[in-house]
Image (cartoon, grey):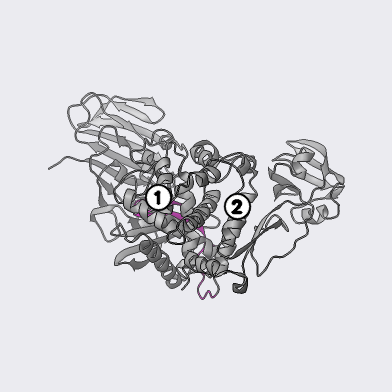
Amino acid sequence: MQKINVYSLCPVSLHAHLFRVTLTIPRPAPEGQQLCMPAWIPGSYMIRDFAKNIISIKALCEGQPVALSKLDKQTWKVAPVSAPLVVEYEVYAWDLSVRGAYLDTTRGFFNGTSVFLQVVGQEDMPSRVYIQKPAGKAYRSWKLATSMQPAAVDQWGFGSYEADSYADLIDHPVEMGHFQELEFEVDAVPHRMSISGKCQFDAERLSGDLQRICSHHALFFGELPVTSYLFLVLVTGDGYGGLEHMDSTSLLCKRDDLPPRGMQAITEDYMKFLGLCSHEYFHLWHVKRIRPEVFKQADLSREVYTELLWAFEGITSYYDDLALVRSGCIEPKKYLGLLAQTITRVMRSSGRRKQTLAESSFDAWTRFYQQDENAPNAIISYYSKGALVALGLDMQLRDSSREQRSLDHFMRRLWEDYGKQDKGVTAPELERLASEVAGEDLSAFFARTVHDTEELPLEEWLASVGVGYQLRPARNQEDWGGVRGEPEPVEPKPALGARYRQQGDLVELVQVFDGGSAQEAGLSAGDRLIAIDGLQVSAKNLDRLMGRFEPGEEVPVHAFRRDELMTFSLPIQPAPRDTCDLWFLPEAQCTPAQLARRRSWLNEQ
């Protein structure tokens, strides 16, 4: 029998948020075994240094202490031993996100990257994991949910699990506690969702919508490459996020995102949650199996760079909402509203004129995932702009092939040529494949949209499917555009040129935009406004106060910077045209080609 590494994990102190892990290595390296904790988790491109949460660690052999030394921030080396090595350590778990580990008296959660040390040199060795229930009467009814392969578990899900390799071991998040569950099937494959947190929702509506979305994605790619799938959902008062795994996903949402019982018309919040589920489920194929070559054997101790995040996250962001309308969960007008908001987000980021999509992807580690107050002026999201470029690539492929092929065909080719073959893709290969599907060279398209900062021809792309496009001034800072029955003229009103929020009695500037009134006046993020033209200002009355003046005027603004009272002269400027409205052109105004493409695009019969 092959000897395998064994991990035993126990929630030892829920009040102190501590997991205790015991790792048994039957055949440690004869020269001394190295152990390493990942610095980042696949799917989230930021160095998080999970080793910082190991608060104690020791090594034993046959019950006797063994010398253990730390080589760097995340690597240890144990002195040579001639018998099985046992490593015991405790992990502090207080990260309420989809990326780390969490433990208290209400629930436990962890990703393998946060709790399982890597046995250096034995990454391809199978392992076994024993997960124990917390001790005490209060936790007798706790359940466990994970996509990890069970070996011998009890009715609650606690017990032993198996992993084929270290990469497999860390790709199955674990939820434990009291949670609600729902089930549905896609192509006879069981799907489950566990929902943790205090909430009430329409389980029948949710499972029905999820079944439609997941079935659509499976049909889209032509097959479902898993034997089961698990959604792990944490519900909080105000949260949002997701992280994909090989055959599961971790999601964070707010209570209002779930469908209330008896809901008739779909709400904006629920639509957002369905889009999140759709996004992470699409990753089952695109990212987890179709993936950049550099991610196949990624070194989790340091950054791994690629220019392709725009394609993997951007294309996924294009299809996540498009799948909602194609599967029948929302109406086409609702989808246009979501697309308009994506366009608005891009148009409000002047960083799109400074950073290309390829650069945004490459610099994700230090810029996108570590955004500061100047982010809108310096960077562009490879999610949002990537989704718009995916739209453009869809229209380009339809043009080039005379409506015979689309982005759908390109994605299925990626799946057949790369995903199913477990072959990583490079940027040149991706662009070459797109040209092959198009039947002509698309290098000029990629040079313009991915490797340059010029504006995207959105109006042209949308016109090809009979959609009207308008950029107008925002009515207020909560206006993100949407869908209209027809173009609507909006007169530009004076705008501060900043994002702001109420902080006590003052208005704090969160972000100051390039070229806007606030920046021209010398105001900065973190400044707290007291008065405009001698009148007390609040987040509620700021737009009204600004509306009293005409463009070209200058008015005094009093504000605190740190603890110093300062006076600024604010030039009044009209709001920029950066808010998108979209609408379906009446059929009488469309050509047969536009209507045919629209039906194909939205999967309308």
Magenta residue check for 252? yes
Q: Position of residue 329 (x, y in %)?
A: 48, 69
C-beta proximity under 8 Å, tags 2 and 1 = no
Q: Position of residue 310 (x, y in %)?
A: 49, 46
In this figure, which residue is indicated by the disc labeled 2? Answer: 457
- Report the label total: 2
Q: Residues within 10 Å of mark 1 (few under 14, many from 20)?
A: some
Q: If you read the primary sequence from the N terminus, does the residue marked by circle 2 or circle 1 appear first? A: 1
Residue nearest the viewer, comparing 118 with 359: 359
Magenta residue check for 366? no
Question: Quarter-wise, where is residue 544 in the image?
Answer: bottom right
Q: Which residues are magenta?
A: 242-264
Question: Quarter-wise, where is residue 179 in the image?
Answer: bottom left
Report the mark closest to the observer, 2 or 1: 1
Quadrant showing the N terminus: top left
SS class, disc 2: loop
Tell me the number on the disc at residue 603: none
SS class, disc 1: helix
Report whether residue 369 is seen.
no
Whether residue 400 is situated above or below residue 451 in the rendered picture: below
Q: Position of residue 485 (x, y in %)?
A: 65, 70
Q: Position of residue 110 (x, y in %)?
A: 39, 47
Image check: 296 left or right of 325? Answer: left
Whether residue 589 is situated above or below residue 10 in the rendered picture: below
Tell me the number on the disc at residue 436: 1
Image check: 589 left or right of 122? Answer: right
Name which residue lies at 65% across and 49% down: 348
Q: Residues within 10 Å of mark 2 (few under 14, many from 20)?
A: few
